[in-house]
Image: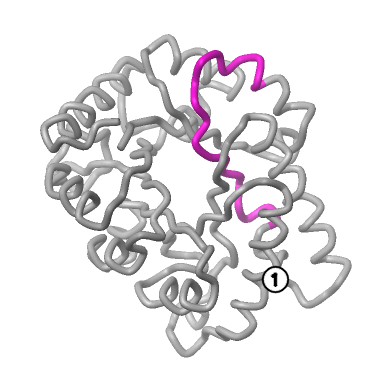
Amino acid sequence: MKVGVSTASLFLRKDNEDALPLLESLGVKTVEVFLTSFSEYGYPFANILKECKGGLFVNSVHDLNTEFEPQLFNAHPRVKADAYGWLEKVLQSANALDAPYYTFHGTARMKRAARVPGADNFPKMIAGFAELLDFCRVHGTQLCLENVEWATYNRPGVFSVLSNALPDLRGVLDIKQARISGYPYEEYLTEMGNHLAYAHVSDYNEKGKMCLPGKGDFDFDTLIKRLKDVGFDGALLIEVYTGDYGAHEELKESCDYLNELLYKNNCLE
């Protein structure tokens, strides 16, 4: 396993072209690039980032999902085609940055009625994901579905149905989103199993406020052991919000904390 940082952790602090050199200067080796808006999708901006990333390994790209991902499943051909046009630009970004993975949320379950099990039209979802997987594969990137409380994978059980029909689908475990959903992260981890590609990690303190790994009460030692048990060997990407920490150097301290735990558990890459 390896440890990295999502540039989402620097949102509103540093633009991506400044965030990447900063993270490299801190000694971070692996990153996820959070593309913040339409102007950052596609080769022109990705080529700028390519020049800025230095020796960083870009594990994955992540876009502002609500901008177009829900419309990838739209029944209207023109709406869907436009959404696929933006998806192609995001995949161009992944290619330019040599990122193997794309972090995907999918549909937006904004209404309460859309969040209950009976609301899922799995045949339609499977058909939509099959098309997406093929499209991403042609563009050299692997689609990875993240557990997100308000999106497609909002509870345990969804991924099992999709991955049973689509064995190439990979998963992203998000600790904070599991916490928000009210389901233990262990249920998501067990369900994704050997389909798990990487994880978004964060901590929380005694008041329930999110913070950097190592600054709160979350049991990362047990998480790492459970990840090891399912054969996971991917990246643990620190993803917090801009107000969840102070100085930028704290990101490096958090990486060091996780690296020490990986070393202790004999699973540091």
**Does residue 215 show up?**
no
Residue range corresponding to the magenta coloring: 49-68
Residue 208 shown in magenta? no
Q: Which residue is mark 1?
A: 73
Classify mark 1: residues with Cα within 10 Å, few (<14), some (14-19) or many (20+). Answer: many
- What residue sits 38% from the left and 77% below the top? 157
Left or right of 234? Residue 141 is right
Residue 59 shown in magenta? yes
Q: Above or below — where is 38 with respect to 114?
A: above
Farthest-out residue, top:
25
Q: Above or below — where is 169 with respect to 139?
A: below
**Does residue 90 show up?**
yes
Instruction: Indicate the quadrant containing the N terminus: top left, top right, bottom left or bottom right.
Output: top left
Left or right of 197? Residue 63 is right
SS category of the residue bearing label 1: helix
Q: Residue 109 placed where, x, y %?
A: 53, 71
Q: Quadrant of residue 177?
A: bottom left
Left or right of 188? Residue 263 is left
Q: Residue 90 placed where, x, y %?
A: 70, 43
Q: Above or below — where is 165 with respect to 266?
A: below
- What residue sits 27% from the left and 66% below the top? 190
Q: Disc 1 residue type? A: Phe
Instruction: Indicate the quadrant containing the C terminus: top left, top right, bottom left or bottom right.
Output: top left
Q: Quadrant of residue 3?
A: top left
